Amino acid sequence: MQLNRLALALTLALPLATLAAPGSGIVQRNFDPTVRIQDDLYMAVNGNWNKQTEIPADKTWWGAFGELRDLSESRVREIVEQAGQNGAADVEARRIADFYQSFMDEPAVEKAGLAPLRPLLDHIAGINDVTALTREFGLLQKHAVSLPINIGVGVDAKDSSRYLLEAEQSGLGMPNRDYYLQADDRMVKARTAYTDYLKQLFQLAGADETQARDKAAAVMALETRLAKLQWSSVANRDAQKTYNKLSLDGLRKTTPGFDWSVFLAGADATVGELDLNQPSYVRAAAKLINGEPVSVWRDYLTARVLDRYAPVLPQAFVDAHFRFHQQAIAGAKQIKPRWKRGIALVEKNLGEDVGKQYVARYFPAEAKAKMDTLVGNLLKAYAQSIDKLSWMSPATKAQAKDKLGKYVVKIGYPSKWRDYSGLVVKADDLLGNVDRGTEFAYRFDLAHLGKPVDRSEWGMTPQTVNAYYNPSMNEIVFPAAILQPPFFDATAEDAVNYGGIGAVIGHEISHGFDDEGSRFDGNGNLREWWQAKDRKAFAGLTGKLVNQYNAYSPLKDRRINGKLTLGENIADLSGLQIAYKAYHLSLGGQPAPELDGYKGDQRFFIGFAQVWRDKARDEAVLQGLVADPHSPSRFRAIGAAVNSDAFHATFGTKPGDGMYKRESERIRIW
């Protein structure tokens, strides 16, 4: 099932360098001795690494997280390639090996050409009226094509005991509506690259140059109209406004002109109600669907299908897809090796088959036991912090502690594995495997409707280097791949572990109390459990955080959007504060040792800064600034630390220091 739309993942940058000394955890060779921690925590700790590190040509950004992801990919490659040696008797291994083989057989892909996709393209070419077009919007849901309206299954935000079909805006070929609408040179350049890409797709599919140019221009114009109708990324963060549960009659009244019965029948989604995330968008889109010539919509759907399948088509399509998506939009210099793309495809379609093997090889039981202790200390510290809040009333504190007490913690891997036995995989049928895998996942999602919520399911695979909080489940989840050295090292002294994985745990706990997560109660239901005066006080504090991040400028003439990144910034700030308190709980009243010339508290903040080291190409930074709810890594490190009383006390900051912030101006939320 799709990860709940409001689930808040961390997107970490993790250090994968050898520890400087046994038990220390700090990597001194990455330090820049010309920068004082009091002036710039991030550059003081990571500056030398930043100076000496080049972003690999096939990456759009690089850092410790990328290195750790590479390690995970290499391990999965070993699992997948060995699966091919296990023989036909091992059904799971054979399934993995055959899917990978179908992608790696380049000559077969080239020989097949566009023929495997022709039936779908011909079906689109036969659309002759709005009813057929609406039905096609439904049919293409099973192919995971990005369309003006996309559906998925999630937990009902206001009744966490049941599932609900959701519909939301989509259908743009560029990352975000801002790419279509903003006037600066970088966005204009992106639009030119996209139009060129569309033209290439049409030519590769058989159109002559003039036809391809005209079709590309028409599709670009149509998507621009869609972009103008869509809600902004900030507006989409409002859980109340995006929750609109309607019956079929209610949908018809709310969005006249769009035939939901035809659409849902095409999608094989026979439901009596639906959560419509952006009603005003769908109302306006319905007019566009009825007003634009059907021929333009046919070209639009052709482009969307070609774009979706390009990575598994012959090399000319692969190259065109890379030049636009990875090069023009994100800044990569060369395409990833084919084996990495093959591994990603296997993981996307058979993620838990692979995860089962990954856990057996790379996740020791003692790692889970250590995490249990860390999480326990973080939850205890959070409860103590709630008790001491000066801005929150006793009534709301009681509700907050009730929610905290109901947190579900998932560590390493799911308690039960997904069953892929119904998925047919053939070693000589790449596009068929992709289609069957996509439809298998789609029907797996739909099958949840009408059944009790399965709280054992995971939204990430064990081999994913990340973590998340899901408000509808009120759960924090830490896949196995993130729980390894050096980010989490059972042999390292506690200070850096608490600055690293401790801050991650605190971050995920804090998502339940950020501006979005705090709208959900301990049972995962969207309801207002706050006293009005407390919500007002909270808004005052978070407003200051918005202003703080609005002032940061990662690119020339581009600032962080403090409202878009607010939830992640709250989680970073609060996670650091809670991790620090939990670290001191772990000391049990005993003094921390001094290692590598640094005291325990100093190592804690150094460990925190280390996890954020990374570099990104300007194109990737721009994409993040308009579409990513996370701030760029450097500002995640310094933005949280400047508000920490413990940081200022530990390093003795003074007026004039780059990191100095007056005590009266420091933002303390949780």
Image (cartoon, rainbow, N blue to C red):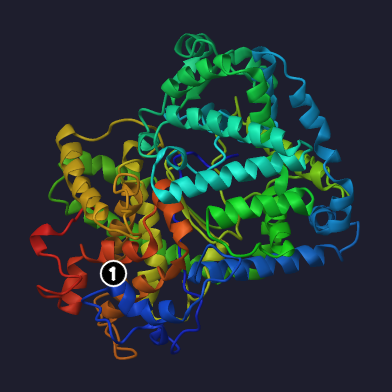
- Pinpoint residue 83: horizontal percent, then vertical percent: 81, 63
The answer to whether residue 117 is left or right of residue 496 is right
Image point (74%, 41%), residue name:
203
Image point (41%, 29%), residue name:
242
Asked if 169 appears above or below 578 in the picture, the reply is above
Asked if 490 appears above or below 408 in the picture, the reply is below
Q: Residue most toward the front?
A: 210
Q: In this view of the protein, which residue sits in the foreground, 101 or 324?
A: 324
Q: Is residue 385 visible?
A: yes
Q: Quadrant of residue 94?
A: bottom right
Q: Residues within 10 Å of mark 1 (few under 14, many from 20)?
A: some
Image point (38%, 60%), residue name:
632
Residue with the mark numbered 1: 585
Q: Quadrant of the N terminus?
A: top right
- Pinpoint residue 464: horizontal percent, then vertical percent: 58, 59
Q: In this view of the protein, which residue sits in the foreground, 514 or 568?
A: 568
- Pinpoint residue 74: horizontal percent, then vertical percent: 67, 70
| Total numbered labels placed on residues in the image | 1
Asked if 218 appears above or below 547 in the picture, the reply is above
Q: Is residue 307 visible?
A: no
Asked if 451 appears above or below 360 in the picture, the reply is above
Amino acid under disc 1: Leu
Q: In this view of the protein, which residue sits in the foreground, 298 or 464?
A: 298
- Pinpoint residue 497: horizontal percent, then vertical percent: 40, 73
The answer to whether residue 101 is left or right of residue 438 is right
Q: Secondary structure at mark 1?
A: helix
